[in-house]
Amino acid sequence: MATKKSVGSLKEADLKGKRVFVRVDLNVPLDDNFNITDDTRIRAAVPTIKYLIGHGAKVILSSHLGRPKGVTPKYSLKPLVGRLSELLGVEVKMADDCIGEQVEKLVATLPEGGVLLLENVRFYKEEEKNDPEFAKKLASLADLYVNDAFGTAHRAHASTEGVAKYLKPAVAGFLMQKELDYLVGAVANPKKPFAAIVGGSKVSTKIGVIESLLAKVDILLLGGGMIFTFYKAQGHSVGSSLVEEDKLDLALSLIEKAKAKGVSLLLPTDVVAADKFAADANSKVVPASGIPDGWMGLDIGPVSIKSFSEALDTTKTIIWNGPMGVFEFDKFAAGTDTIAKKLAELSGNGVTTIIGGGDSVAAVEKAGLADKMSHISTGGGASLELLEGKSLPGVLALDNA
Ligand SMILES: Nc1ncnc2c1ncn2[C@@H]1O[C@H](COP(=O)(O)OP(=O)(O)O)[C@@H](O)[C@H]1O
Ligand SMILES: O=C(OP(=O)(O)O)[C@H](O)COP(=O)(O)O
């Protein structure tokens, strides 16, 4: 069963003078000099924090960074304090730990509207184990719990799930709510016609998403590496393209399911083939039905881009997960870039466009079109699970979930 859309509302909570434990997902990429290379997740966390500051709350921020095993200075949240302070317009204080006496003292000195960032919650193995005693220690720091960490909502960890059992009210933050509104709400009740574009490298990682979306969409466009498994299943020669031999029957059954459900399934009719998997490979456009030996399909071709674009022109809601080709190589980025531009254009015409996490988000950002979309998810794994129709433990734990 999909996670229900409606969760306890932050706007109904009494905040003045209250200590609020806010789980955010500040898991941002850092370079070797600890510079933040993409601050999207920090910016996405700002509206909830600003609201709390504006309503006189004492804000305690908790996040993980990376996947540390024990205390690992490389994964400290300290490098984030500057950017966070800048974006919030207040000086954020940093704690050396996330539980314990020192942290309690810092919380006690927090003024109304003050913000304290706790150290990486994954420095404790109890976090990922969802240890109840650890969750109780986190809970004891505050008067209420706000979960705004959508990117981590598919993890049943102490700070994302356990703490909600001991700290009430437990409500969703604005980012969490927005993600659910789009990835659950808009997908469950789409303005029709509703199209899904699914790409990425392998069909095996997208089976759940494709099957779940087949029950909802009018049009399904497939791109990326997974299409060659469909071609091979249909008896086409695919050269040395990526193929999952053990998924040939599955590909055929998905084609049948689409037919049975009256979904218009579009596979590219031409592809850009390369003589090696490299940015400087030689390339040529070939029909999807006959990729020469020694060549591999790395992008959808121009005829397919045109027919995909025309199909999208007829829609009112579009969800996109997974790039159309190897967009990391400029030579094979046209399919992904043109689809991103098409969605940006359609957004401007009132079409709801949702980018469901992962590499498709990176592609849209690379194309400079992030601001044009109705919604860009901040969670890869979490959005995939939602689109598969699964429930997220971090959401289920909240009041009114
Ligand atoms: N034709 C292709 N052959 C091989 N890899 C591909 C092809 N098209 C796309 N990819 C790769 O798929 C990767 C993204 O796959 P995936 O992780 O499934 O998507 P997402 O992260 O959006 O869910 C990208 O790194 C991209 O280079
Ligand atoms: O980056 C994250 O997920 P994502 O790469 O699936 O978007 C989240 O911060 C969750 O991190 P995790 O996969 O280490 O639990």
Image: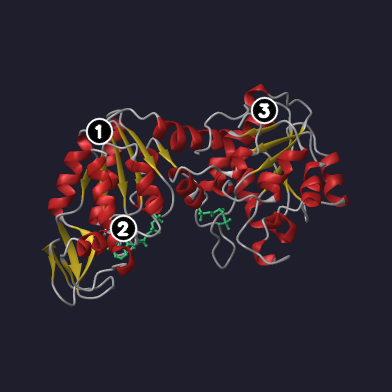
Picture residue at 71% right of the left edge, 49% below the top:
158
Q: Amino acid at mark 3?
A: Gly
Q: Secondary structure at mark 3?
A: helix
Query: Is 291 on the left or on the right of 339, as rendered?
Result: left
The quadrant where ligand 1 appears is bottom left
**Can residue 34 be seen from the camera position used here?**
yes
Q: Nearer the viewer, residue 28 or 377?
A: 377
Picture residue at 32% right of the left edge, 54% below the top:
199
Q: Secondary structure at mark 2?
A: helix
The colour scheme applied to this rendered structure is secondary structure
The answer for how far apart the CA atoms under marks 2 and 1 are is: 27 Å
Residue under label 3: 54
Q: Which mark is residue 250?
A: 2
Q: Amino acid at mark 2?
A: Leu
Q: Is residue 345 above or below residue 128?
A: above
Query: Is 168 on the left or on the right of 206, as rendered?
Result: right
Q: Nearer the viewer, mark 2 or mark 1?
A: 2
Query: Is 259 on the left or on the right of 356, as rendered?
Result: left
The picture places residue 88, in percent across and down from the top left corner, at 62, 39
The answer for how far apart the CA atoms under marks 3 and 1 are is: 40 Å
The answer for how far apart the CA atoms under marks 3 and 2 are is: 53 Å
Query: Is 104 on the left or on the right of 88, as rendered?
Result: right
Q: Is residue 128 above or below residue 394?
A: below
Q: Quadrant of the C terminus?
A: top right
